[in-house]
Image (tube, grey):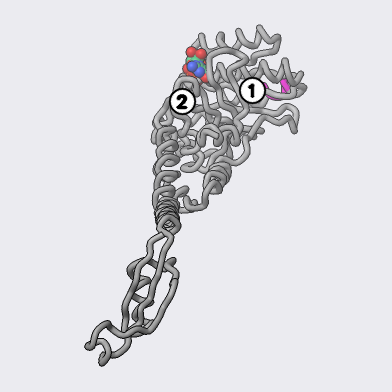
C-alpha cells in the first residue's frame, strides 16, 4: 500500500493531483482544511490536506490486464484487416491465377479462358468453380452416339489419313456386336490401298460380320439395299487431305445420292487446335456431323476437345485412347472431362 499526502487549494485540484500521481484506483483516506504553520500561515488562505493511498499490486495487475487487453485488441484488429484485404484482393487473384493457370496447362485456348473470365465472378467463393463447370458443359453439349432408329442405321466415318478411322470402326463394331447384340455390317469405300480393304475385312472376319467393298459412290445405293436386314452399317472411307478439293469430291458425291443416319469426322487429338478447326471448317459442306476424337493417349493436354467445340459449335461422340481393339474407346463424358480439367 502506498500512502501519500497532498496539499491543494481546493479538493478538485487535490483529486487531479492524486489521480495523476497514484492512478484512478487511489482512495482518499482523509481530507481536512488546514492553514500553513507559523505567523505567515495565520494570515494566508486555508488549503486542503488530503491523504490518499493506493494498493500497488492491484493497480499493477489491473494495469497489466488492461495492457494485455489492449494488445489483444490490436492483434485482433490487425488480423481482421489482413482477412479483409486477402479476401478482397489476395484470394481473388490467387484463385484466378491458379485456376486459369491450370486450364492453360491443359491447353485451353485464350478464347475459352476469356469467356470464363468475363462470365465468372472469382470473388464468389467456391461457387466460381461450379460456374466454370456450367459454362464448359454448355460448350460441350451432350455426346452424339450411334442409335438404332432406322434399319439399317448408316454411320459414315470421314477424316484425315491415319487418324484411326478403320481401327475405331473395328472397336465400335466389336462393342455393338458383343455388348449390344446388334447385327452389324461393314462397308468400305477405301479402295485406294489393297491393305486398307484387307485391314477392315480382317476385323469383320474376326467378328463374323460381312464386309462389303464399293468402288465408287454410285455403287452405294445397291450395296445398302443388300444390307437392309442389318441394324447398323459402319462405312469406312479413305483418309482425305482436307486441303485437296478433289479428294473431298468423292464424299460430296456420296452424300448427294445417300442420306446417312450419322456422320463422324474422325480427328486425332495429337493435331494442333488450329489445324483441327481448319479441318472441321473444310467439311462445312456437310449439314450435320459430329467429331470423334482419337489418340487421347498420345497427348498430355486434353484442352483441345473443348477448344474445338467452342470454335466450331460441333459436338463430340466418342474418344479413343489406345490401339487395342475393342477396349480403347469410350463414350465422351462431358462431366468427367470437365472434372478432370478442373481437377475435382
Ligand atoms: N495411340 C493410339 N493409336 C491409335 C488410336 N487409334 C488408332 N491408332 C493407330 O493409328 C494408326 C492408324 O490407324 P488406322 O485405323 O489405320 O487409321 P485410318 O484413319 O483408317 O488411316 P487411313 O485409312 O490410312 O486414312 C494405327 O497404327 C492404329 O493402331 C488411338 O486411340 N491411340
Ligand atoms: Mg483406314
Instruction: Tell me residue 273's x, y (percent).
Output: 41, 34
Q: Is residue 209 left or right of residue 4?
A: right
Name the residue: 40% across, 81% down.
32
The number of callouts visible is 2
Whether residue 192 is visible here, answered yes or no, is no
3D distance between C-alphas at marks 2 and 1: 17 Å
Query: Quarter of the image containing the C terminus?
Result: top right
Q: Which residues are magenta?
A: 223-227
Label 2 CA crowd tier, 10 Å (few <14, some 14–19, many 20+): some
Query: Quarter of the image containing the N terminus?
Result: bottom left
Q: Is residue 44 above or below residue 225?
A: below
Name the residue: 43% across, 36% down.
102
Whether residue 269 is visible here, answered yes or no, is yes
The residue positioned farthest toward the bottom in the image shown? 43
Magenta: main secondary structure: helix
Element type where label 1 sits in the image: strand
Residue 113, image quadrant: top left
Element type where label 2 sits in the image: loop
Q: Is residue 291 left or right of residue 37?
A: right
The residue positioned farthest toward the left in the image shown? 40
Residue to which mark 1 is pinned: 234
Name the residue: 65% across, 11% down.
204
Amino acid at each position: 500500500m502506498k500512502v501519500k499526502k497532498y496539499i491543494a487549494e481546493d479538493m478538485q485540484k487535490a483529486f487531479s493531483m492524486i489521480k495523476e500521481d497514484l492512478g484512478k484506483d487511489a482512495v482518499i483516506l482523509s481530507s481536512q482544511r488546514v492553514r500553513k504553520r507559523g505567523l505567515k500561515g495565520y494570515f494566508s488562505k486555508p488549503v486542503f490536506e488530503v491523504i490518499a493511498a493506493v494498493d500497488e499490486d492491484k493497480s499493477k495487475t489491473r494495469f497489466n490486464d488492461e495492457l494485455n487487453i489492449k494488445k489483444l485488441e490490436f492483434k485482433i484488429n490487425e488480423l481482421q484487416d489482413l482477412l479483409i484485404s486477402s479476401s478482397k484482393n489476395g484470394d481473388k487473384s490467387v484463385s484466378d491465377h491458379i485456376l486459369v493457370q491450370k486450364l492453360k496447362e491443359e491447353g485451353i485456348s485464350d478464347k475459352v479462358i476469356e469467356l470464363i473470365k468475363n462470365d465468372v465472378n472469382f470473388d464468389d467463393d467456391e461457387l466460381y468453380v461450379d460456374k466454370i463447370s456450367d459454362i464448359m458443359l454448355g460448350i460441350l453439349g451432350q455426346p452424339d452416339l450411334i442409335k438404332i432408329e432406322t434399319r439399317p442405321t448408316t454411320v459414315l466415318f470421314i477424316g484425315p489419313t491415319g487418324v484411326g478411322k478403320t481401327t475405331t470402326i473395328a472397336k465400335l463394331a466389336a462393342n455393338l456386336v458383343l455388348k449390344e447384340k446388334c447385327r452389324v455390317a461393314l462397308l468400305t469405300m477405301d479402295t485406294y490401298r489393297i491393305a486398307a480393304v484387307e485391314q477392315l475385312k480382317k476385323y469383320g472376319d474376326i467378328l463374323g460380320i460381312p464386309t462389303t467393298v464399293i468402288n465408287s459412290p454410285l455403287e452405294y445405293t445397291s450395296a445398302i439395299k443388300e444390307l437392309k436386314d442389318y441394324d447398323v452399317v459402319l462405312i469406312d472411307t479413305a483418309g482425305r487431305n482436307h486441303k485437296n478439293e478433289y479428294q473431298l469430291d468423292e464424299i460430296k458425291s456420296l452424300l448427294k445420292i445417300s442420306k446417312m443416319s450419322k456422320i463422324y469426322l474422325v480427328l486425332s487429338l495429337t493435331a494442333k487446335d488450329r489445324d483441327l478447326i481448319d479441318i472441321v471448317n473444310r467439311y462445312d459442306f456437310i449439314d450435320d456431323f459430329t467429331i470423334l476424337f482419337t489418340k487421347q493417349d498420345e497427348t498430355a493436354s486434353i484442352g483441345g476437345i473443348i477448344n474445338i467445340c467452342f470454335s466450331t459449335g460441333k459436338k463430340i461422340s466418342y474418344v479413343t485412347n489406345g490401339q487395342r481393339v475393342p477396349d480403347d474407346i469410350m463414350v465422351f463424358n462431358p462431366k468427367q472431362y470437365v472434372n478432370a480439367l478442373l481437377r475435382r
